[in-house]
Image (cartoon, rainbow, N blue to C red):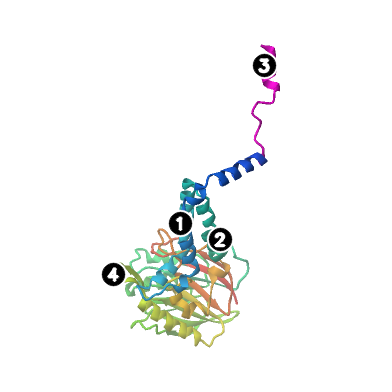
Amino acid sequence: MVQAYGADTGNGSAEQPETGGSRFRGLRDRLTSDRGIWRRGIVLALCSVLLTLLMVVHARIPNRLGNLGSLIETFLPWVAVFIPVLLVLALVRRSATALIALLLPAVVWLNVFGGLLTDKSGSGGDLTVATHNVNAGNPDPHGTAQQVAGSGADVVALQELPGKQVSTYEKSLAGRYPYHSVQGTVGLWSKYPLADTRPVDIKMGWTRAMRSTVRTPQGEVAVYVAHLPSVRVKLHAGFTANQRDNSADALGEAIADERVERVVLLGDLNGTMNDRSLNAVTSQMRSTQGAAGDGFGFSWPASFPMARIDQIMVKGVEPKSSWTLSATDSDHLPIAARVEL
């Protein structure tokens, strides 16, 4: 019994721990011997390629058919949700081809949107601004006004102001903002004097945009407040945004003609920075969120934000930080930014 035990433990036939080199050789042998690992998952690989092409050539997708290009661009960051889905399917299929192909959309998405994942906010700044689409059906206008004012903003812009609630917003903000103007359904409140305040024609037939010169201690700043027309997604018409697009062009012309060097745009543009239809505005201004924000800063819908259609944009001004405020009783989230004049 002793001899048998000694023979079993000393003859070298017992299983030895697998080393790193043997594991690598085992993986190499499986990759070379199991040809199916390369043949399986071709369809999944093609899906990865299509997802990559969608991000690379989205600007070439025509808008002639239901503004399809703008619709895709509005929600373009969300293509990322398909990457982990394809990863799981590739692992289930045990497909090396699908896994390698998945690197394409992952790398492209990180190249396009990866910069938004980091916190680019900094310290300093001379002026804090905030904007909020308060929603015409807001059941608590006083609370909403107080909440936005609580952000500490020097200048506050509000959109979608119903006529019967304007006085409520005025009374709620009067204590903090001695200067204000309401033009149509948009308004501007400021701690600093306002001058040359007037409506801006954005081709809608009624006033949903305005501009005013804010006389800050650091000098004059032209502040625009705008609420571009809403867009709709319809089965029979696609992404109906023609009126929004025409208003964006008119707003872009007004800003281009602005004589004050420093310009801030606050408002609900009903479109994202990726939407080519807003090029008349976005091509000449910087997004504070893109330049100095933390994350995507989605603002709509408030219950589950999926897109940043509320914007703070600047020209001749340096963004220092940009953030989203807590939800109010509106279907939009208020947003704020601090800039250096």
Label at residue 82: 1
Q: Residues within 10 Å of mark 2 (few under 14, many from 20)?
A: few
Query: In this orientation, does residue 281 appear?
Result: yes
Q: From the image, state whether disc 3 or disc 1 is nearer to you.
A: 3
Upstream in sequence: badge 3 or badge 1: 3
Q: Residue at label 4?
A: 236
In the displayed structure, would residue 192 be above or below residue 74?
below
* Identity, as a three-letter code, of the amino acid under mark 1: Phe
What whole-number distance in Å separates the C-alpha atoms at marks 2 and 3?
57 Å
C-alpha span from label 4 to label 1: 26 Å
10 magenta-colored: yes
What residue did someone put label 3 on?
5
Q: Front-most of 76 and 341?
A: 76
| Real-space CA distance between mark 4 and mark 3, rounded to the nearest whole angstrom | 82 Å
Observer-side mark, 2 or 4, equals: 2
Q: Is residue 112 above or below residue 229?
A: above
- Residue at 33% x, 75% y is 163
Q: Residue furthest top?
A: 1
Label 1 secondary element: helix
**Foreground tag (4 vs 3):** 3
Residue 292 vs residue 185: left or right?
A: right
Question: From the image, which quarter does the C terminus lie in?
Answer: bottom right
Hey, what amino acid is under mark 3? Tyr
- Number of dots carrying numbers: 4
107 versus 8 height, above or below = below
Residue 56 magenta-highlighted: no
In space, the residues marked 1 and 2 are separated at their CA atoms by 14 Å
- Look at mark 2 in the image and give the residue it sits on: 107
Q: Secondary structure at mark 4?
A: loop
Tell which circle, 1 or 2, labels the residue nearer the N-terminal end. Answer: 1
Mark sitting on residue 266: none
Magenta range: 1-20
